[in-house]
Image (spheres, rainbow, N blue to C red):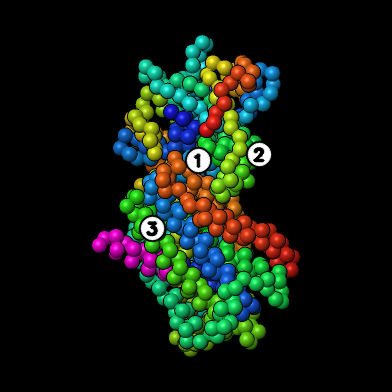
C-alpha cells in the first residue's frame, strides 16, 4: 500500500515538475515557426529522459549512492572536476532562465517589469529551500504544478487535425529555415534531457532511502511521470502550432506566449498561463538550486540533505544560496529571459555527452550495480540520442548565434 | 583490497556515520626490502587540488588556502583507525575532531545562522 | 620515503629497457599483521575496468555498446617497481617477465 502511494505521488510530482521555462519556451517557439513539424523531437527526448531518470534511480537504489557520488568514485578526480564545472555552468544558466520565467509571470500579473522581480523570485526560492523539507519541496510544489495540465486542456479544446499531428510525429528534415529548425530541435532536446533532472532524482532516491525493493516503483515513476510530462510538452507545441503558426506569429517574448492559453480560454487563460509559468519555473528553480548544492556536497563528501537544517549542512546550504544569487544577476540586469532560456537549452545539449557517457559507463559497472546493470538496448538508445543532440548542437549553435536568431 | 577502486575517492564516515569528507589521497611508506605500506588516508586541504592538471591547480590552490581552514593542510587519518571499507570508508574518529567540522561550524556561525538557518 | 598513491594513478610505467607497459590503474594490497601492505600494481591502457579517464571516453562508448574492449595490462609485483622517482616509475625487470593482467 505504501509503495502504491509512493508510485502515485511520484508520478503526479513528475508530471507537475516536468514542465519548466525551457520546455515552454522551446516548444512554443517550435510550434509557432514550424507548426507540427518538430513534434517528433519531444517523444524522442522524453524516451531518452525516461531511460536516464530510471537509470539514476536504479543506481541509487542498488548502490545507496547518488550519481554524483558514483561519478567521483569511479571516474577519477580530473573527470569529476570537469563534469562539476560543466554542470555548474549549465545549471546556473538554466536556473537564470527559471528565475526569469518566475519574474515574467509576476510581470504578467502586476505590470511591473520583470527585472524588478528577479531578486524576489530568487529570495522566494531560497526561502522555500531554507525553511522547507525535501517532502514539502518535491511534492508540494509539484502538486501545484499540475496547473500545467491546462495546456493539455487547451490542446484538446482547439481540436488539432489528427493527420497533421501524425505527420509531425514522423522525423523530417524540416522545410524553410533549416538552421532554425535544427537549432530548435537541439534546444527542445536540451530542455527535456537536462542533467539536473537525473542528478536531482538520484539524490531524492537517497534522501528517501530507496533500496532494491524500490526498483519497481522507480521504473513506474520514471516511465509514467516522464511520459505524462512529455505529453504536456507536446500539448504546448500543438497549441502554439494552432494559435501562432497559421497567423505567422513568431514567439519572441514571453508576453506573446500568453496567447497559448488566452486563445482557447479567454481571460481565465491569461491567469492560467501566468500561474503555469510561475509555478513550473519555481519547481524547476528549486530542483536546480538543490542540484548545484548536491553536486558540490556529494562530490567533496560534505554533509548534505534537504531534511537537515541549513546550519547542520552549512557548506551545502551556502552553495545553493550562492547559485541563486548568481543566477538572479542577468535577469535583474534586464537580459531577456526568453533568449537566456533558449540558448541555455542548446548549451545543455552541447554538454550532454560529457555527462551522459560516463553515466552510461557507470550503469554497466557490475561492481556498483551487480546484476542490475543496463540492457544493451537502453545503452544504444541513450547513446544515439545524446550523440545526435551533440552533433546538432555543434552545428547549429554557432549558426544561430551568427544568424542573430 | 583494490586501493583505487575501493578506497580512493570514497566517502569517509566517522564513528557515528556522519560524512567528514572523501579519501583525496592515500599515503604509502616505502621501505627497503619490504613491501610499501599504507600509513594514512589524506582528506581535504591541497591533496585533491594537487590532482588537478597544471593550469587549474594554481587558481584552485589559491582559493583553498585563502578561504579554507588550516592554510590548505590535509587532514590525515592513520590506517589503524579505519574500521571498515565498504560502500563508504568508516573510521574511528569523531567528526568534531576534524577540520571539515570546524569549517562547517565556522560557516554555520558566520553566515548561515545570521540568515536564520 | 612517502609516496602519494593518488599521484601514482595514471602515471606511465616503463620497463628496464625504457619500453612502455601502460599506466598505473590499480594498487592491490593485503592486510598482514595489522599492516596494509602493497602486493602489486596493475597497469593497463584503458582504465576500462577500474577507472575511467577522460582520454578513454570513445573506448568506453564502445564498451557501453557491448563491443569488447581490447587491451589488458601487466601485474607488477611490489618488489619489481622502482619508485625512486615517483613521477617516472619503472620496473626492475623486462616486461616479458611480468605476468599479464587479464582483468
Disc 1 and disc 3 on one polypeptide chain? yes
Residue underneath mark 2: B55
Residue pictured at 62% horizontal, 29% vertical: C22
Disc 3 and disc 2 on one polypeptide chain? no
B63 vs A91: above or below: above
The 10 Å Cα crowd at callout 1, few under 14, some 14 to 19, many 20 or more, is many
Residue underneath mark 1: A74
Question: Whole-percent x and y of residue C45?
Answer: 61, 34
Residue pictured at 53% horizontal, 37% vertical: C49
Q: Is residue A273 visible?
A: yes
Question: Whole-percent x and y of residue A213?
Answer: 32, 52
The magenta region covers A1-16
Cα separation, mark 3 vs mark 2, equals 42 Å
A27 vs C31: above or below: below
Which secondary structure is most common in the magenta stretch? helix
A92 vs B40: above or below: below
Closer to us: A349 or B112: A349
Q: Please say whether residue A42 is one of the residues in the magenta stretch.
A: no
Counting residues from the start of the chain, the first of labels 1 and 3 encountered is 1
Of badges 1 and 3, nearer the viewer stands 3
Residue underneath mark 3: A218
Closer to us: C86 or A102: C86
Cα separation, mark 2 vs mark 1, equals 23 Å
Q: On the image, which quarter does residue C68 sit in?
A: top right
Residue pictured at 62% horizontal, 68% vertical: A185
Q: Residue furthest top?
A: B33
Mark 3: secondary structure: helix
Tell whether label 3 touches label 1 (CB within 8 Å).
no
Closer to us: C86 or B104: C86
Q: Chain of mark 3?
A: A
Question: Whole-percent x and y of residue A294?
Answer: 45, 50
Amino acid at each position: 500500500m505504501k509503495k502504491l502511494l509512493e508510485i502515485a505521488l511520484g508520478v503526479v510530482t513528475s508530471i507537475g515538475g516536468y514542465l519548466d521555462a525551457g520546455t515552454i519556451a522551446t516548444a512554443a517557439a517550435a510550434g509557432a515557426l514550424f507548426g507540427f513539424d518538430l513534434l517528433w523531437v519531444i517523444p524522442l527526448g522524453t524516451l531518452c529522459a525516461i531511460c536516464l531518470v530510471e537509470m539514476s534511480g536504479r543506481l541509487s537504489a542498488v548502490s545507496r549512492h547518488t550519481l554524483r557520488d558514483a561519478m567521483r568514485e569511479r571516474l577519477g578526480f580530473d573527470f569529476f572536476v570537469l563534469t562539476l564545472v560543466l554542470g555548474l555552468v549549465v545549471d546556473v544558466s538554466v536556473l537564470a532562465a527559471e528565475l526569469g520565467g518566475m519574474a515574467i509571470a509576476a510581470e504578467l500579473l502586476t505590470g511591473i517589469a520583470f527585472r524588478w522581480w528577479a531578486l524576489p523570485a530568487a529570495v522566494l526560492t531560497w526561502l522555500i529551500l531554507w525553511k522547507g523539507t525535501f517532502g514539502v519541496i518535491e511534492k508540494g510544489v509539484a502538486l501545484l504544478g499540475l496547473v500545467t495540465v491546462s495546456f493539455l486542456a487547451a490542446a484538446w479544446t482547439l481540436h488539432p487535425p489528427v493527420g497533421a499531428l501524425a505527420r509531425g510525429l514522423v522525423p523530417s528534415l524540416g522545410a524553410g529555415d533549416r538552421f532554425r529548425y535544427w537549432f530548435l530541435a537541439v534546444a527542445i532536446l536540451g530542455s527535456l534531457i537536462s542533467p539536473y533532472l537525473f542528478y536531482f532524482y538520484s539524490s531524492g532516491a537517497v534522501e528517501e532511502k530507496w533500496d532494491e525493493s524500490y526498483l519497481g516503483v522507480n521504473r513506474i515513476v520514471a516511465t509514467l511521470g516522464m511520459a505524462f510530462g512529455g505529453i504536456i510538452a507536446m500539448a504546448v507545441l500543438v497549441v502554439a502550432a494552432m494559435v501562432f503558426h497559421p497567423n505567422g506569429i513568431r514567439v519572441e517574448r514571453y508576453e506573446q506566449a500568453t496567447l497559448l492559453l488566452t486563445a482557447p480560454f479567454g481571460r481565465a487563460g491569461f491567469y492560467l498561463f501566468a500561474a503555469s509559468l510561475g509555478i513550473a519555473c519555481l519547481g524547476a528553480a528549486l530542483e536546480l538550486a538543490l542540484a548545484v548544492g548536491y553536486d558540490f556536497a556529494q562530490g567533496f563528501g560534505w554533509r548534505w540533505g534537504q531534511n537537515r537544517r541549513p546550519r547542520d549542512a552549512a557548506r551545502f546550504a551556502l552553495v545553493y544560496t550562492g547559485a541563486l544569487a548568481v543566477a538572479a544577476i542577468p535577469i535583474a540586469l534586464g537580459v531577456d529571459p526568453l533568449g537566456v532560456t533558449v540558448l541555455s537549452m542548446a548549451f545543455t545539449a552541447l554538454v550532454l555527452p560529457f555527462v551522459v557517457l560516463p553515466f552510461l559507463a557507470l550503469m554497466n559497472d557490475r561492481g556498483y550495480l551487480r546484476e542490475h546493470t543496463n540492457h544493451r538496448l537502453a545503452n544504444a538508445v541513450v547513446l544515439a540520442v545524446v550523440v545526435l543532440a551533440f552533433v546538432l548542437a555543434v552545428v547549429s549553435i554557432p549558426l544561430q548565434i551568427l544568424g542573430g536568431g | 583490497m583494490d586501493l583505487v577502486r575501493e578506497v580512493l575517492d570514497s566517502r569517509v564516515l566517522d564513528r557515528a556515520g556522519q560524512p567528514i569528507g572523501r579519501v583525496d589521497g592515500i599515503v604509502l611508506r616505502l621501505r627497503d626490502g619490504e613491501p610499501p605500506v599504507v600509513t594514512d588516508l589524506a582528506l581535504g586541504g591541497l591533496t585533491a587540488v594537487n590532482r588537478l592538471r597544471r593550469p587549474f591547480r594554481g587558481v584552485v590552490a589559491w582559493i583553498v588556502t585563502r578561504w579554507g581552514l588550516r592554510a590548505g593542510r590535509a587532514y590525515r587519518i592513520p590506517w589503524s583507525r579505519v574500521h571498515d571499507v565498504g560502500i563508504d570508508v568508516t573510521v574511528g574518529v569523531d567528526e568534531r575532531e576534524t577540520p571539515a567540522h570546524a569549517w562547517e561550524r565556522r560557516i554555520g556561525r558566520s553566515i548561515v545562522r545570521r540568515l536564520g538557518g | 620515503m612517502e609516496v602519494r598513491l593518488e599521484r601514482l594513478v595514471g602515471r606511465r610505467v616503463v620497463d628496464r629497457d625504457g619500453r612502455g607497459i601502460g599506466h598505473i590503474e590499480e594498487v592491490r594490497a593485503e592486510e598482514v599483521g595489522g599492516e596494509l601492505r602493497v602486493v602489486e600494481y596493475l597497469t593497463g591502457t584503458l582504465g576500462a575496468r577500474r577507472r575511467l579517464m577522460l582520454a578513454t571516453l570513445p573506448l568506453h562508448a564502445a564498451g557501453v555498446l557491448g563491443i569488447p574492449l581490447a587491451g589488458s595490462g601487466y601485474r607488477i609485483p611490489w618488489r619489481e617497481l622502482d619508485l625512486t622517482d615517483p613521477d617516472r616509475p619503472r620496473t626492475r625487470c623486462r616486461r616479458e617477465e611480468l605476468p599479464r593482467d587479464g582483468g
